[in-house]
Amino acid sequence: MIVDQALYRDGVRQPGRPSLSELASDAAQSGSLAWIDIRRPGESEFAEVASLFHLHPLAVEDAIHAHQRPKLERYGETQFCVLRPARYVEPTETVEFDELHVFIGPGFVISVCQGDLPDVAAVRASLERRPQVLAEGPPAVLHALMDRVVDDYSPVADGIEGDLDDIEDQVFGTGDDASRRIYQLTREVIGFQRAIQPLGEISERLMDAEDPSSEEHRYLRDVHDHAIRLGERVEGFRELLDRILQVNLTLEAKALAEASNEQTVETKKISAWAAIIFAPTLVGTIYGMNFKNMPELAWEWGYPFAILLMVVIAVVLYVLFKRRRWI
């Protein structure tokens, strides 16, 4: 779906909504810029745009089917850039990634969003308030979109950092469900790292095409610096997650060992008391048989002896187990 399409002359938006064919013809004029913003395009819908602006079939296929890594490719006079915008979802404490494809060529920009990120309309509105920047042509639009994507990474990094603090509290506190959260956050950090890492190379290649003294080169250098700093920050997150995981595994192993030791102690206690109870029971069982020829049955001290024997055996076993710390 085409969200917006406009023609700019010397950085100023022209009134009306020109057709795609008008934009394609006007884009070739000096000082003109055609900017088309498309969201989740289908093959048939994107076919007219690709034909009018002579987009390479391979780049068109990438833009339609998405699931691309960040990259910058050149097809003749057209450059094709893929970016991975991201946002941190506070309620679910997760990171969501979208995909932005940008075609820039002689006098035109075609931005293709596969999701809701970034807010291209906000970028367009910001550039329209600075016609001197838009007058620089298609590279200025690409730089502004890259800058917005990189700026949106900062809240994501802050959210991940908060999650790391929560995980540390879990690991060094109760430890409840920490391993699952560490695994989930590690996957998010890896995805975030894959989105950021290529931006350094992309911005460097774009800077090489610009005059070092130009304003665009300075903007690109700022984007490059932001991308490098974010990349280093996320790399630190990943290293910290690895350390937290190791600590968590150590604590879990310790907890299992302690639980096993406690279970062994309880088993010893049960066995000891069972032995103490069994000995008097055995004596009482023998004397309770009431066989006629048992000599103890006619003995005057037989009953006190049986009671004394049961008590002595129980006490001896209790003292023995107590010394062995079974009870």
Image (cartoon, grey):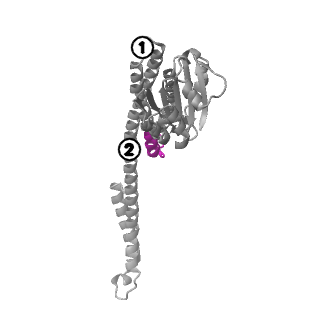
Q: Quadrant of residue 234?
A: top left
Please name the residue shown 33% across and 55% down the image.
323
Q: Residues within 10 Å of mark 2 (few under 14, many from 20)?
A: some
| Residue 251 shows up from this direction | yes
Q: Residue pushed farthest right?
A: 16
Nearer the observer, 2 or 223: 2
The front one of 201 and 48 is 48
Nearest-to-viewer mark from 1 and 2: 1
On the question of residue 93 being in view, the answer is no
The amino acid beneath tag 1 is Asp
Above or below, 292 against 325 in this view is below
**Left or right for 108, reference 294:** right
Which circle marks residue 211 in the picture? 1
**Are the residues tagged 1 and 2 within 8 Å (C-beta)?**
no
Q: Residue at x 44, y 18 (%)?
A: 221
- Measured from the top left, where is residue 198 in percent x and y? 40, 30
Please state which amino acid type lies under the numbered disc 2: Leu
Q: Is residue 192 left or right of residue 10?
A: left
The location of residue 157, given as percent across then percent down, is: 49, 30
Residue extent of the magenta highlight: 172-187
- Identify the main secondary structure in magenta: helix
**Label 1 crowd bin: few (<14), some (14–19), many (20+), radius 10 Å:** few
Distance from the alpha carbon under mark 1 to that under mark 2:
53 Å
| Residue that badge 2 annotates | 249
Sequence-first disc among 1 and 2: 1
